[in-house]
Amino acid sequence: MTADGLEIRQSSASVWGSATELRNLKVVSKLIDTTTCIGCKACEVACQEWNDLHIVPTTQTGTYQTMPSLDANYWNLIKFREVEESGFFAWLLRKDGCMHCADPGCLKACPAPGAIVQYQNGIVDVNPEACIGCKMCETGCPFDIPRYSAKTDKMAKCTLCVDRVQVGLEPACVKACPTGCLEFGDKAELVAVAKARVEQLKQNGFTQAALYDPPGVGGTTVITVLAHGDHPEWYGLPKDPQVPVAVSLWKNVARPLAALAIAGSFFAMVAHYLSFGPKTPKEGAEKPKGDKPA
Amino acid sequence: MRSIPVADQRSGSGMGDAAMARARSTEDVVVGDEIVRERLSARVVHWIVALTFFVCLFTGLPIWTPYLGFLAHLFGGLHVCRILHPWAGVAFAVASVFMFVQWVSQMKLTKADREFITPKGMLRYFQYRNEDADVGKYNGGQKLLFWAAALGTVGLLITGLVIWFPLEFPQWVREASYLLHDAAFSLFFAMIIGHIYLGTAAEPGTFRSMIRGTVTKSWARLHHPRWYREVTGEKAGG
Ligand code: HEM
Ligand code: SF4
């Protein structure tokens, strides 16, 4: 169920949106500061509770991580990673979940009209009623976020608590975070906060600290401060995420070309019929005995 | 016993139609002024292939583009299409195997066929300048369609299975499959448009070979002269 009343910027498999651009709507953002995350998982619990998600059994993988990867019933997962490289050791925690891309590959790949929508405020939401369970979004997403549930035959992922945001509340995870590692607000303001934070980290010796707001997907609504900004892969983040080239090629190039081939075949047929007509025996040709014209 | 008048054999009226009766199990025989071209089993298989092909097409097109979303209503919505499409694809592939087996022995491309399917040969064919062509039961273009359909079906089946169960395959295989499935179906569709046109409007008298199973002698002599000679025993030019 999508949030009624929010203006839609783009909608999957749709040539329309409800964007009127009448209102001056701010683009929201969630800031994740990986350097102040203590791995308490209050956000995971808050997410489960607010969204009334089914309990998913935890899996012990030998780390502090709740389970190996996101689930259709688990949209927010603190990823725990140990990095050891030439004498250097780091313990990295990052909250994994939908990044709410400005250019969402999931939405682009989705063939069901309105199953994935992006509101004017930047939130990428899913509409299970329209979802046909084809899993194409899983191929479209560069962050490996959407999860298919065989039980419901639907895709599910973080909605950035759009139902809370819509009524002026912050997402449940942000509300629960005890360290201030998560912040919610206007994107422009939070980018400024994040940049100041990066500067602070640099002064404290993390010279490669950076803000992760990847331009390959038009920037993301969820922005992340990384102490080791030169190595996003240490946190399980792609270095330069893009909507997969094949997905863009498929929707933007292959589809029009295919339409052209099909239409061309129709037109060739009509043109041929108008120019040559049906093929019949030549006038005056001797007919086989006892045969009537075809 | 009542002898069947020649006129009745053609019209197919009543229960006694000698040509159709022969066409149940025989091919390439002359009955009156008709020639049996496709036996019943061949026609049934062809129509199962055609039916399943169009179910695939019309359930696939609304998933392919929202502009053709209205087609989903024929089946009860996009959710139904999504369930129906892969199963129709399996049925289409299975039916195509039968079609392949029944026709493959007659579809070997001869030297004349290879000339027929060159751009020059095809132009001659489409401009009706090929009366002298030494065309057997199937012309080069028909054989080409047969092989292209076989290849296309294999391609659609393999990529279709990947798209059906994408999570079992690596990312690049999925990406390639979405692209190739689209490319294959659109070329297939374009080809079938041509096929239907040639089998109906462009060459009157052809469609009945897939309905009654028979064609007229004059049709055979016009479109498949060598086959006509082989079946009737008439000499070239006679
Ligand atoms: C409504 C759709 C279709 C119509 C009206 C149609 C019509 C015909 C006709 C009249 C023939 C006999 C040609 C002859 O006797 O020389 C034929 C043959 C054949 N059809 Fe179709 N067909 C249709 C769909 C399909 C589809 C979907 C396929 C393949 C997937 C297909 C594959 C073939 C093949 C391989 C042959 C034998 C070779 C040839 O004659 O080209 N047909 N069809
Ligand atoms: S992170 Fe993945 S699921 Fe979230 S908006 Fe981007 S592409 Fe879609």
Image: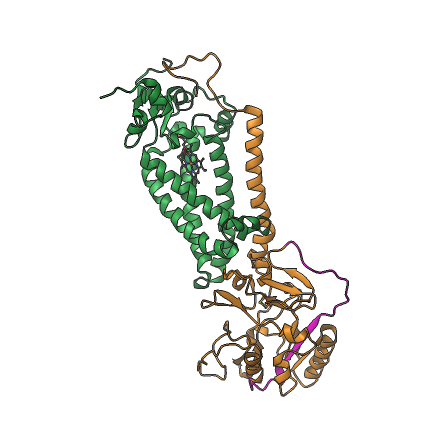
Chain colours: A orange, B green
Magenta stretch, main secondary structure, is: loop
A157 vs B238, left or right, is right
Above or below, comparing residue A89 to residue A28 in the picture: below
Above or below, comparing residue A17 to residue A100 in the picture: above
A190 vs B122, left or right, is right
Q: Nearer the viewer, residue B166 or B72?
A: B72
* Total marks in image: 0
Region rendered in magenta: A15-41
Q: Residue at the spot x=35%, y=38% of the render?
A: B44
Residue A62 occupies quadrant: bottom left
Residue B139 occupies quadrant: top left
Which quadrant of the frame does ligand 1 lie within? top left
Considering the image in quadrants, where does the N terminus of chain A appear? bottom right
Residue A240 falls inside the magenta stretch = no
Residue A38 falls inside the magenta stretch = yes
Q: Give percent across and percent down for residue B154.
A: 40, 47
Q: Is residue B206 visible?
A: yes
Q: Give percent across and percent down for residue A69.
A: 49, 74
Considering the image in quadrants, where does the C terminus of chain A appear? top left
Q: Give percent across and percent down for residue A228.
A: 61, 78
Direction left: furthest residue: B1
Residue A43 occupies quadrant: bottom right
Above or below, comparing residue A104 to residue A190 in the picture: above
Q: Residue at the spot x=52%, y=54% of the render?
A: B77
Q: Give percent across and percent down for residue A5.
A: 68, 67
Q: Is residue B139 visible?
A: no
Q: Nearer the viewer, residue B203 or B5?
A: B5
